[in-house]
Amino acid sequence: LNDKTVVAVGHVETVSPEPGAPKRVVIDSLRRWRGKRKQPVQIGEVEAYLALTAKRYNNARILADPWQASGMIQRLRTQGVLAEQFPFTASSTGRIGQALHLALRNHLLWLPNDDELISELAHVRLRETGIGQARLDHDSGDHDDQAVAIAIIVAELIGNARTPGGKEWLESMAVQCENAPCTALNPKGSVVCRVCGGPI
């Protein structure tokens, strides 16, 4: 919270009323705070904004990085806000990166007309970190805070096998490699895995 803090709000909607129509994520709001060494981001200001925004958006659930926000999450919970930790593990970072990549590639993400956001998304990429594992990455000097916040929303709303329709959405957009131990997601229609090179 000392350097840069991003809060993004989004919802999911169907592309058309037809049965089985794909879903897209709409980013409703994006707020940035930038701190300096002598003037860090004020956690109280962020906390008050989150509490107000959650109520404004129909008691929306908040997911926050526990590394610097565990105390804030607890305080928000005492106010009746649905606040949870989003732990950044190899599995979760791969999941959100893949979900954002697929949503962008398949035009299932509506974004605010924000030059800074568009520029950041244009410079982030998926980087392979191991067999079947990938994460969002960026060049030195660039940032990915906004991309990560939006990726979490996409993964939780439509790119998550635990949510209604999430498993079907993932399977419709990508093919998972079945060559053990590789489990990489590949573009639909692939016949060879882009990670291990084995047949799909």
Image (cartoon, helix red, strand yellow):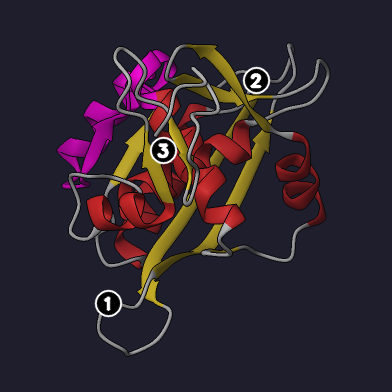
- Determine whether, in the image, residue 67 is placed left or right of residue 149: left
- Residue 40 is marked as 2
- Asked if the residue under mark 3 is in contact with the one under mark 2, i.e. CB atoms within 8 Å, the reply is no
Horizontal and vertical percent position of residue 12: 37, 66
Q: Counting other residues with Cα less than 10 Å from the Cα at mark 1, is it few (<14), some (14-19), or many (20 or more)?
A: few
Q: Magenta stretch containing residue 80, yes or no?
A: yes
Q: Quadrant of the N terminus?
A: top right
Residue 195 seen from this side: yes
Q: Give the residue type that dot 3 points to.
A: Glu
Q: Counting other residues with Cα less than 10 Å from the Cα at mark 3, is it few (<14), some (14-19), or many (20 or more)?
A: some
- Determine whether, in the image, residue 192 is placed left or right of residue 62: right
- Residue drawn at point x = 26 percent, y = 38 percent: 76
Q: Considering depth in this image, is 34 or 162 the residue closer to the camera? A: 162
- Residue 47 is marked as 3
Q: Is residue 155 above or below residue 23?
A: above
Q: Which of pointers 1 and 2 indicates the residue nearer the eye? A: 1
Horizontal and vertical percent position of residue 46: 49, 38
Q: Secondary structure at mark 2?
A: loop
- Asked if the residue under mark 1 is in contact with the one under mark 3, i.e. CB atoms within 8 Å, the reply is no
- Residue 52 is marked as none
Q: Report the Cα–Cα distance between label 1 and label 2.
A: 47 Å
Q: Secondary structure at mark 3?
A: helix
Q: Quadrant of the C terminus?
A: top left
- Which numbered disc, 3 or 1, marks the residue that appears first in the sequence? 1
Q: Give the residue type that dot 1 points to.
A: Gly
The magenta stretch is 65-92
